[in-house]
Image (cartoon, rainbow, N blue to C red):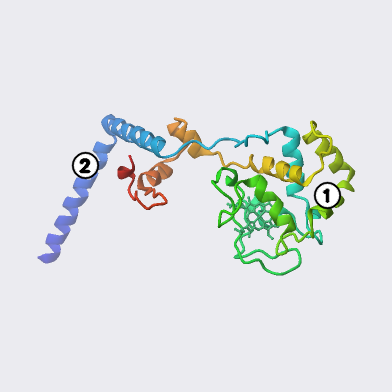
Amino acid sequence: MKQTFLAFIMLAFLFTSCQNAEENTGNETVDSLKQMDQNLLVKAQKLFKVLPEVFEKEGNPITEAKVKLGKMLYFDTRLSKDKTQSCNTCHDLATFGVDNLPTSPSDNGGLGTRNSPTVFNAAIHASQFWDGREPDVEAQAGGPVLNPVEMAMPDEASVLKRLSAVEGYVALFAEAFPEEEKSLTYENLKNAIGAFERTLMTTYRFDQYLNGDATALNEQALRNIEKTQPYFHDGSVTDLKEAI
Ligand code: HEC
């Protein structure tokens, strides 16, 4: 008797869920879903801004020649003492700008004490390094080359000496900084690497979505935004609805 009763309940449940499925195919439901997605887009636009394609710094305009030079330097192992490491060793652009290691080995084989953060979108951070000790990517770029647990070059002069011995670099620095008489300087090494890093932005589908293209994201991604619980540094907002 008990079993028959249970079976009846299950049948009744199945029947009602089939009915609901039928209703869901109606135009009304499609329209209301569209409206919900539209509302979601408006909410998301209030919370997030589209990433810029490049993020220029006043005083260090981004030019093609500078980015080309910065990219060469970024991948060049000659910037490290034993020529074993480039910026890309610890911030591999093929693996989202990180090396996937707890801490990174240095040019001289020892281990650093901190995890290497990604260089993607680093240019728009309010400051650089985990402790924020440098203001921007230009200022930051000079550090690792001379850091004993990173690229371990003894001083700026030896870096410049090494680069000046490469004919291609002399020409590339001159092209990147045409207005300067002496273009191959440590300051310009930082400016060129910084300019290249300012092009490392992850502008993608979410940005197209924020730009108003509601079809840029698939259903699963849309539902994930719905579940997003943004928080700010003071921990004040924990719910999407509260944030608006
Ligand atoms: C040996 C590994 C290693 C090398 C080589 C290296 N870095 Fe780093 N990088 C790190 C580590 C570790 C940190 C974090 C250190 C800290 O916070 O004190 C870091 C931090 C950074 C940051 C800060 C990002 C943020 O979100 O705060 C940027 C930008 C960066 N490196 C760019 C570069 C550039 C450009 C070069 C080449 C000139 C370079 N790195 C070479 C390991 C490395």
| Image position of 200 with respect to 149: above or below | above
Q: Is residue 114 left or right of residue 15?
A: right
Image quarter for ligand 1 equals bottom right
Q: CA distance from mark 1 to mark 2?
A: 76 Å
**In the image, what residue type sits under mark 1?**
Leu
Residue 99, image x and y in percent? 64, 58
Q: Residue at x 39, y 52 (%)?
A: 234
Which quadrant would residue 169 be assigned to in this image? top right
Q: According to the image, label 1 marks what residue?
A: 160
In the displayed structure image, the side of residue 223 where residue 102 appears, left or right: right
Question: In the image, 22: left or right of 148?
Answer: left
Q: Residues within 10 Å of mark 1 (few under 14, many from 20)?
A: some
Dot 2: what SS? helix
Query: Mark 1 and 2 residues: CB-CB less than 8 Å, in contact?
Result: no
Residue drawn at x 73%, y 63% as measured from the top left = 148
Query: What residue does disc 2 label?
Result: 19
Q: For the residue labelled by badge 1, is the local secondary structure a helix, a strand or a loop?
A: helix
Q: Residues within 10 Å of mark 2 (few under 14, many from 20)?
A: few
- In the rendered structure, the answer to whether residue 100 lies left or right of residue 22 reads right
Residue 27's x, y, as percent?
A: 29, 30
At a point 62% along the width and 49% down the height, the residue shown is 119
Outermost residue on the left side: it is 1
